[in-house]
Image: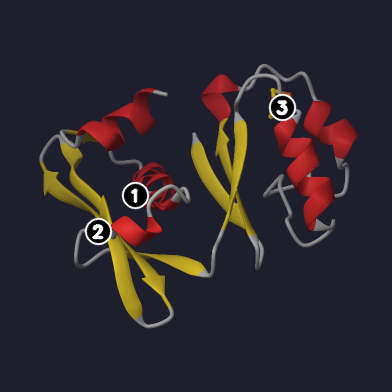
């Protein structure tokens, strides 16, 4: 399961397949990470340094995080894509096709000046998260998206 959690400044990626339940997250920030709660991550209850430090201590790589850099990601279901915006300007997208076998991510791109900020990963996660919520199979021909899917 892939999920995105965010507050105004930070995005946390959660890949449940990598988690081996060492529970360092629960110990590091019990307000943010509570396995009895749904959703189990609440980004509004602790400050950014506490969240960042806790995510960094995850031994499995199931939790990772990036700064948002004032970039918002939206899921555009009708357009078969997720889209990144800096203000009103589109600065990236992740496009998928819809077939009988499920969704296939075919293209992920971010404007060069916004590369290296984790935006492509946020775009891909947004599509994967939507496919999982819809219970649709997801695959990719886009090499970057495939790397995120297999990671
Ligand atoms: S610290 Fe990482 S590996 Fe441990 S329970 Fe939390 S997410 Fe899972």
Residue 88 lies, in percent from the top left, at 37, 83
Task: Report which quarter residue 80 is drawn in.
Answer: bottom left
Residue at point 72% right, 33% down? 56
Label 2 beta carbon less than 8 Å to ligand 1:
no
Between disc 1 and disc 3, the foreground one is 3
Indicate left or right for 150 with 22 as reference: left
Kindly indicate whether the residue at mark 3 contacts the one at mark 1 (C-beta within 8 angstroms): no
Indicate left or right for 14 with 54 as reference: left
Residue at point 79% right, 37% down? 54
Among numbered discs 1 and 3, the one appearing first in the sequence: 3
Label 3 beta carbon less than 8 Å to ligand 1:
yes
Residue 69 seen in render: yes
Residue with the mark numbered 2: 81
**SS state under label 2:** strand
Kindly indicate whether the residue at mark 2 contacts the one at mark 1 (C-beta within 8 angstroms): yes
Ligand 1: quadrant of the figure = top right
Residue 44 lies, in percent from the top left, at 77, 62
Residue at point 22% right, 32% down? 143
Kindly indicate whether the residue at mark 3 contacts the one at mark 2 (C-beta within 8 angstroms): no
Label 1 beta carbon less than 8 Å to ligand 1:
no
Residue with the mark numbered 1: 127
In depth, the one of 128 and 84 nearer the eye is 84
Distance from label 1 to label 3 (Cα)?
A: 24 Å
Vertical side of 77 occupied by 38: above or below: above
Task: Report which quarter residue 46 is drawn in.
Answer: bottom right
Among numbered discs 2 and 3, the one appearing first in the sequence: 3
Residue with the mark numbered 3: 58
Residue 89 lies, in percent from the top left, at 33, 78
Between disc 2 and disc 3, the foreground one is 3
Label 2: few (<14), some (14–19) or many (≥20) C-alpha neighbours in 10 Å:
many
Quadrant holding the C terminus: top left
Vertical side of 102 occupied by 130: above or below: below
């Amino acid at each position: 399961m892939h999920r995105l959690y965010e507050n105004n400044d930070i995005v946390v990626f959660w890949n449940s397949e990598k988690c081996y339940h060492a529970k360092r997250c629960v110990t590091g920030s019990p307000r943010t990470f509570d396995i009895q709660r749904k959703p189990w991550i609440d980004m509004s209850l602790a400050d950014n340094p506490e969240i960042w430090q806790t995510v960094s201590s995850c031994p499995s790589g199931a939790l990772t995080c990036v700064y948002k850099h004032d970039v918002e990601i939206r899921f555009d279901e009708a357009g078969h894509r997720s889209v990144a915006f800096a203000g009103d300007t589109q600065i990236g997208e992740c496009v998928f096709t819809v077939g009988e076998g499920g969704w296939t991510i075919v293209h992920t791109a971010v404007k060069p000046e916004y590369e290296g900020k984790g935006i492509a990963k946020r775009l891909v996660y947004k599509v994967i998260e939507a496919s999982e919520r819809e219970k649709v199979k997801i695959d990719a021909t886009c090499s970057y998206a495939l790397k995120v899917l297999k990671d």
